[in-house]
Amino acid sequence: MNFAYKTLYTRDQPLFELKVAGIFIFSLFFASNILIQFNSASKVAGIVIMLFLPFILLSAGIYYYYKIFQLKELNPIDIIILLSLLLPFYNAITVNMIFDVKIMKALFNLSSRFYVVMCSLIYYAIRSNKITLKQYLYANLLLSWFCFALYTFVSLTIPPETFISGVGDGLVGYNPSKGGYIYRFSSALIVFGMIYYFLDYIQKNNILSLFFWMMFLAYQVFIDKGRIELVSVAIPMIIYMVYLLKWHDLIKKLLTILLLIGVVLIIAYLIDPKIIQFTADMYWMFLKFFMGEKTGEGSADMRWTEMAAVYNYFLKYPDHIFFGIGTPKSEILQKNVGTVIFGDIGIVGGLLSQGIVGLIIIYSVFLYPLFIWYKVKHYKHDIFFNVGVLSTITVFIQSLFSGAIFYSFLGIMLPLIIMDYYRVKEKNYWKEQRSKPPA
């Protein structure tokens, strides 16, 4: 088929494009962290978030009232979301007990975490066939490209120093090895796009998807410069290739990928040779950090200092290790613990904020997708199912080093929704097989 006429997607319901656009808009404002991450840098974003919150809480209240008291049933996604809603209350109580911050004030500071409840509405719409999983995934692919364009534009046109007040709140960080002040945009949807196009290439040999994957990869390496994010997504991709492909296919695809990476590196070198040296130094420092060596890089060495501050705090207050200290504002944290940024130190920051009890609750969530992966047989190689699997593994690896899941479940809801959908689909498939008369 002529490439110009090749079908890029298939419609699976009437008004397909309209529904994809609607889900895109809904997810942009209510079921993703795209808007939320600008809260610390923009008063407008903060106002919009607070204006949306009553609508979100009202919608969630109606939904859960209907599910609990009318239908008298909750699906696993509902239960996980309700579990995630305990975290803001849990953190507000611990902050109140330890630092005497009023519970309502602490909850107000954590209000953006309640956005996760809107994912229940999306999953309900999928299960009731108001929308399809394909429409939901295509809408998130659009969000991936939206994030790619937005983050690239902001990174290249607006100096991060403009939002220096956001340092410590997630939007802007400081790292000399990355050029000083940098944006710390969420990688969740970028990673989703990377995984989808990677699998589309591996399973269907779609060269166009390989180029799209390389665009997201180039963004991650040269613009976002997120080393943890890149390693977290690379590990499951490599495991998947080794697990799925025969050795000759594996070598062929690896050589194709390496050839394309080589072309990108040559282009980057022609633009500015310093880009390659800068990137190589950045990852060399990253490797030395994990070998436990002094890197000379302020940001990497600072993480050891932050972890030492957490260790010293627990020596001073050993009972706080069980329930954590919550997520107080950076001023309170610095005064009582030291210069610590929760997101910098992954599971160590999670232990400080959530305690042993909180970590057990949060990591128990990963047992559910593991259970689904074990149970699903017929759809084991379905591309969308594997997007959910690889995305979940990526979130787990990231939790060890950056730990976003300790503070919001929004980043894991997309892969969980995908995997739970296939749990039901698998169950229905075998039910149909058993109901067929013997041949």
Image (tube, rainbow, N blue to C red):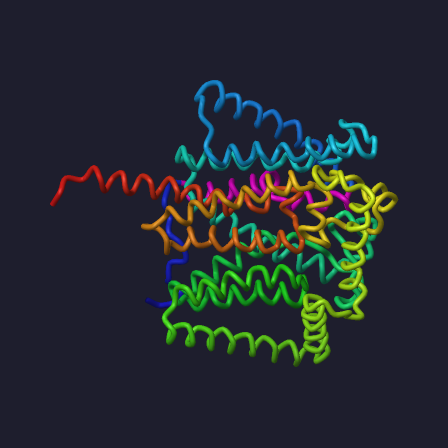
Which region is colored magenta?
15-42
Q: Is residue 23 magenta?
A: yes
When the figure is inspected, residue 177 is found, relative to residue 376, above or below; the finding is: below
Q: On the image, which quarter does residue 293 sit in?
A: bottom right
When the figure is inspected, residue 385 is found, relative to residue 64, above or below; the finding is: below
- The percent position of residue 377, horizontal first and vertical second, equals 34, 50
Residue 159 visible at all: no
Residue at x 42% of width, y 51% of height: 385
The prevailing secondary structure element of the residues shown in magenta is: helix
Q: Residue furthest right?
A: 335
Residue at x 78% of width, y 62% of height: 299
Between 32 and 68, the residue placed more toward the observer is 68
Q: Is residue 151 magenta?
A: no
Between 301 and 228, the residue placed more toward the observer is 301
Between 361 and 155, the residue placed more toward the observer is 361
When the figure is inspected, residue 250 is found, relative to residue 226, above or below; the finding is: below
